[in-house]
Amino acid sequence: MNQAQYLANSVAAFRDWLAQRLCGQPISFAVPGAVAYPDLPSALATYRWPRRARNGLPNPHLSLPHVHPVVPRLAAHSSLATNEAVLQTIQRQMRTAYAAGPTSANQLSGAVAAVLYWGGVYTKRGNLGWLSANQANLLVILQTVVNDHARGSDTSAVTNLRFNSGMTKVYSLLIDGFIIYDSRVAAALAWLAKRWWTIDCGQPALTLPSLLRFACLPANGAMARYRNPDLALFPLLAVNPYEHYTWNVRTNWLLADSLRVAGNSNLFGSLREVEAALFQMGDRVI
């Protein structure tokens, strides 16, 4: 499915509703135990990351030959602007190394390690281990996905695609218009879609169109149970890189077009700001 095919019919109607929310129309988000947000701009205003302080990565890290970008220490609960400064530094090294090719392999893997570390997903048995094992082929792996994405389809034809909560962060810096689709962003979109369909449209929940049944991802630890507003509506992705990729791409299209439709009345300066508002809202949706 391409962008024009996805952004049609019921998805277009939801996009128009979401565009109004980007202009400050209310969402009246309130669930037990969660921060209440009357609108999406109020969610953006509360953005804070990380929950625990992040030191700049040592170089080399755990004896791997990465060349890490020099980034400042991130205090716990840093602002969006502070996080953006860190991500822009990582992005510059990642894109420069990617464009330079094989001669900058250590700089490329260092930038990938840095964004995984920033996102709190640089785990020894997960992304760290994978990066260590695939450092020699990392450029080709990333090129394959970037070129596949350029086809404009919401399905990936990449063999043995690796796509998880870590790689969505990597591609958000490498590919223009690519958001981080993690458990919090997915949960927020699912909540908004259900609210629009059942309250604004007055339709039964179980008739929500399939193209708006955003796949939800399990969170780590105690928050896992709070990141899906309706298990009967929204599929739970444990390990399914192809489905994760599909919903990431669809969400890229939806949010970018919502910004376009919102026009000059839009209260968000970038796709990253929309993602940040959803990230805050999606911490707990039930």
Image (spheres, grey):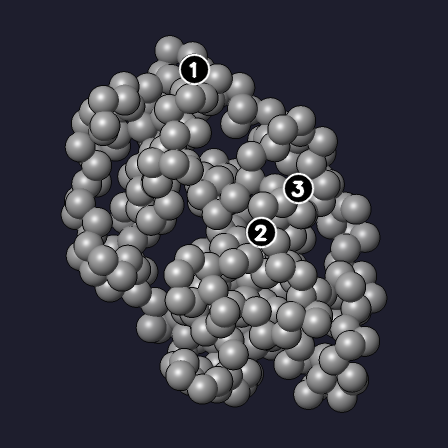
Residue 242, disc: 3
Q: Nearer the viewer, residue 168 or 97?
A: 168
Q: Amino acid at mark 1?
A: Ala
Q: How many marks?
A: 3
Q: Amino acid at mark 3?
A: Tyr
Between circles 3 and 2, the one closer to the viewer is: 2
- Cα distance, mark 3 to mark 2? 12 Å
Badge 1 marks a residue whose secondary structure is helix
Compared to residue 143, the image places residue 88 above or below, namely below
Whether label 3 touches label 2, CB < 8 Å: no
Residue 26 position in % (x across, y down): 54, 85
Q: Amino acid at mark 2?
A: Ala
- Point out the tag, 2 or 1, that comes first from the N-terminus: 1
Residue lying furthest top: 103
Residue 107 position in % (x across, y down): 32, 23
Write the residue at 19% across / 54% down. Answer: 53
Residue 141 position in % (x across, y down): 54, 24
Write the residue at 44% across / 82% down. Answer: 37
- Point out the tag, 3 or 1, that comes first from the N-terminus: 1
Residue at the disc numbered 1: 136
Compared to residue 42, the image places residue 216 above or below, namely above
